[in-house]
């Protein structure tokens, strides 16, 4: 009987020592890493021990020092004047500084065999290059479908006009001529950097008339009334200009604009000495 009691006491001591050692190891593991393991276990079993602490607002401190005196600011009178009607302007596009010869080179890259950039037949001061395509008509050799493209500029290098004429005499040539016209419009848009003109590419490809007018310039693809299957693609200045665009044009007109100073190659502005009264 006494031996059984000793065995029970021995088993109890063993389990107490085992639980103490296991508890110490578990506590060490849970409390390690700044209690992050313990917090992770608590969150897994649905117990959140984190507390939100809202800091108290700090007290306003009084600042001492020399105050800065108020400064009077004079507002110009024109800043308080309401906008005057009839004095507004608008962004204006022009063909000045758009190199006509460069457009001819770009058209050659697009597959148009343009003629050399040189003086025209009617005026040597107007330079031009052109391209012509003829597609045979299966129903009549004397009535071919044609595509004609011409670019004109002045001696200073400015682009004056760019236009194409399309004559579709045979339905079989329509796709080829429409593509040629769309390629020409694409070259115009890339050369001038007026990429909004590319909105008309799909319409040109289907020979659908349209007009795009933007900032004083117009791209027009229209039918001719002289006969069916005839179209014109024209890049030109809009006419008439809206009043705001006209004011912009007049302001930058070289004959009215402030002349260049002598160090920049221009004449010196005339100065008139007015008599002093008194």
Image: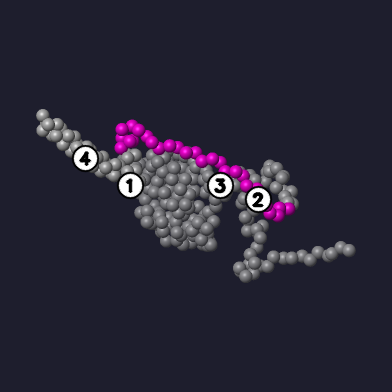
Would you name the residue on which mark 3 appears? 216
Q: Earlier in the sequence, mark 4 or mark 3?
A: 4
Would you name the residue on which mark 2 appears? 63
Return the residue found at the far bottom: 263
Q: From which residue to which does the magenta span run?
A: 41-69
Q: CA distance from mark 2 to mark 1?
A: 45 Å
In this rendering, the label closer to the viewer, 2 or 1: 1
Q: What percent of the width, then of the height, locates residue 135? A: 33, 47
Closer-to-camera residue (44/206): 44
**Image quarter of the N terminus:** top left
110 relative to 100 in the view: left or right: left
Would you name the residue on which mark 4 appears? 17
Q: Earlier in the sequence, mark 2 or mark 3?
A: 2
In this rendering, the label closer to the viewer, 4 or 1: 4
Taking the spot 22% from the left edge, 37% from the top edge, the residue there is 16
Q: Is residue 217 visible?
A: yes
In this rendering, the label closer to the viewer, 4 or 3: 4
Q: Earlier in the sequence, mark 2 or mark 1?
A: 1
Taking the spot 24% from the left edge, 40% from the top edge, the residue there is 20
Examine the image and state in which quarter residue 255 appears: bottom right
- Binning the other alpha carbons within 10 Å of mark 2 as few (below 14), some (14 to 19) or many (20 upward) gives few
Secondary element type, mark 3:
loop
Q: What percent of the width, then of the height, locates residue 178? A: 38, 44
Q: Earlier in the sequence, mark 4 or mark 1?
A: 4
> Which disc, if any, is residue 33?
1
Taking the spot 65% from the left edge, 50% from the top edge, the residue there is 63
Q: What percent of the width, then of the height, locates residue 98? A: 50, 56
Q: CA distance from mark 4 to mark 3?
A: 97 Å
Closer-to-camera residue (274/67): 67
- Binning the other alpha carbons within 10 Å of mark 4 as few (below 14), some (14 to 19) or many (20 upward) gives few
């Amino acid at each position: 009987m006494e031996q059984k009691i000793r065995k029970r006491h021995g088993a109890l001591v063993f389990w107490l020592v085992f639980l103490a050692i296991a508890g110490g190891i578990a506590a060490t593991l849970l409390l390690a890493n700044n209690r992050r393991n313990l917090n992770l276990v608590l969150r897994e079993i649905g117990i959140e021990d984190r507390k939100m602490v809202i800091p108290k607002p700090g007290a306003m401190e009084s600042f001492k020092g020399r105050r800065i005196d108020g400064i009077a600011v004079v507002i110009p009178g024109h800043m308080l004047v309401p906008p005057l009607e009839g004095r507004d302007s608008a962004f204006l596009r022009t063909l000045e500084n758009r190199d006509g010869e460069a457009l001819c080179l770009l058209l050659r890259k697009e597959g148009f065999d343009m003629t050399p950039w040189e003086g025209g037949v009617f005026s040597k001061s107007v330079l031009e290059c052109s391209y012509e395509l003829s597609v045979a008509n299966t129903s009549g050799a004397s009535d071919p479908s044609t595509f004609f493209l011409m670019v004109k500029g002045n001696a200073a290098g400015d682009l004056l006009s760019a236009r194409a004429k399309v004559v579709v005499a045979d339905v079989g040539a329509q796709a080829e001529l429409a593509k040629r016209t769309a390629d020409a419009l694409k070259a115009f848009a890339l050369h001038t950097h007026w990429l909004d003109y590319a909105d008309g590419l799909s319409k040109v490809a289907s020979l659908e008339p349209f007009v795009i007018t933007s900032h004083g310039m117009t791209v027009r693809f229209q039918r001719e009334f002289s006969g069916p299957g005839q179209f014109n693609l024209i890049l030109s200045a809009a006419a008439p200009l809206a009043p705001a665009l006209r004011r912009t044009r007049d302001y930058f007109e070289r004959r009215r604009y402030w002349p260049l100073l002598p160090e920049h190659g221009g004449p010196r502005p005339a100065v008139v000495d007015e008599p002093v009264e008194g």
